[in-house]
Amino acid sequence: MIRENILRIREQIVSACSKINRDPAEITIVAVTKNRSPAQIKEAIGAGIYDIGENRVQEAAVKFKDLQPAISDSQLRWHMVGHLQTNKVKETVKMFVCIQSVDSLRLAEEINKQAAKMGKVQNIMLEVKTSPEATKFGLKPQEVLATTQGLTRFKNLKILGLMTIAPWFDDAEQARPYFRQLRQLRDEINSSSAIGYRMADLSMGMTDDFTVAIEEGSTMVRLGRAIFED
Ligand SMILES: *Cc1c(COP(=O)(O)O)cnc(C)c1O
């Protein structure tokens, strides 16, 4: 079932891309694996998914131990997508290729500190609260530019882009303005040259709305149910 789901998702990505002339290769599927078993995750990996999203570092650590021996280290890329507390940062920096849920300068500072200790440049994304209802966490859109500028002093961080969770609607089309807003924010930051390099990524789109997110420029779709459920 997981393999079939992933095949279907890939087809949906191709057809969303063809509507707006994008190359499907620009879009990374991040399998969000909270509450899924290592066996389920292995099945997804077997179907070609190498980007794994986790919400909690403890849960990720258990799976990491289980999965890493089976799969070569360099192949799996772990993304932190859940709210992160500063006391969990050290462990997170050790394990995750990207921390997508950075929502404060204080958290960024701690990530930078731990990354510096490990001699690592940590990829991060800024989580933006494009809707007050959808999530408790994230920067307000009007705070993002200044926060991005504030991050430039942290030499062990690389900002890949922005992440958001759109509110849920019966009709995914209604999520479109939230995705568009995130894209516009990214473009604004890039044209302000606030950080001296271009942030390319937009992590947006989940099971119920990822095709709309792709039409609005998503480069990473975070999928749970679409991959693991009927
Ligand atoms: C659970 C989760 C997802 C995946 O949600 P689905 O609707 O199951 O695709 C994506 N992003 C975050 C941050 C999540 O917590």
Image (cartoon, rainbow, N blue to C red):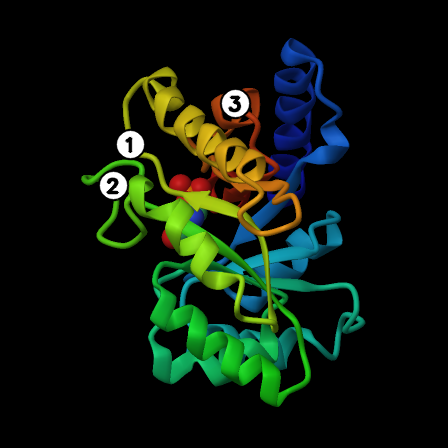
Relative to residue 149, is residue 113 depicted above or below?
below
Relative to residue 143, is residue 172 depicted above or below?
above
Across and down, in percent, residue 208 comes to 41, 30
> Label 1 belongs to which residue?
168
Amino acid beneath label 2:
Ala
Across and down, in percent, residue 137 comes to 27, 54
Is residue 166 found left or right of 203 in the rendered image? left
Q: Can residue 209 be spotted in the picture?
A: no
Amino acid beneath label 3:
Glu
Instruction: Give the distance between the C-alpha atoms of the residues marked 3 and 2, in whole angstroms.
Output: 19 Å
Which residue is at a point 52% across and 68% down the rendered structure image?
153
Q: Residue furthest top?
A: 19
Which residue is at a point 38% across and 71% down the rendered structure image?
107
Q: How would you rate the neighbour count of disc 1 (Cα within 10 Å): few for under 14, some for 14-19, many for 20 or more?
A: some
Across and down, in percent, residue 80 comes to 49, 63
Precedes in sequence: disc 3 or disc 1: 1
Precedes in sequence: disc 3 or disc 2: 2
Q: Nearer the viewer, residue 65 or 5?
A: 65
Q: Can residue 18 be spotted in the picture?
A: yes
Relative to residue 158, is residue 144 depicted above or below?
above
Checking the image for residue 134, the label placed there is 2
Amino acid beneath label 1:
Trp
Element type at mark 1:
loop
Which residue is at a point 64% across and 55% down the rendered structure image?
51
Q: How would you rate the neighbour count of disc 2 (Cα within 10 Å): few for under 14, some for 14-19, many for 20 or more?
A: few
Q: Nearer the viewer, residue 93 or 173?
A: 93
Across and down, in percent, residue 117 comes to 60, 89
Instruction: Give the distance between the C-alpha atoms of the residues marked 3 and 1, in whole angstroms.
Output: 17 Å
> Label 3 belongs to which residue?
216
Is residue 130 found left or right of 64 in the rendered image? left
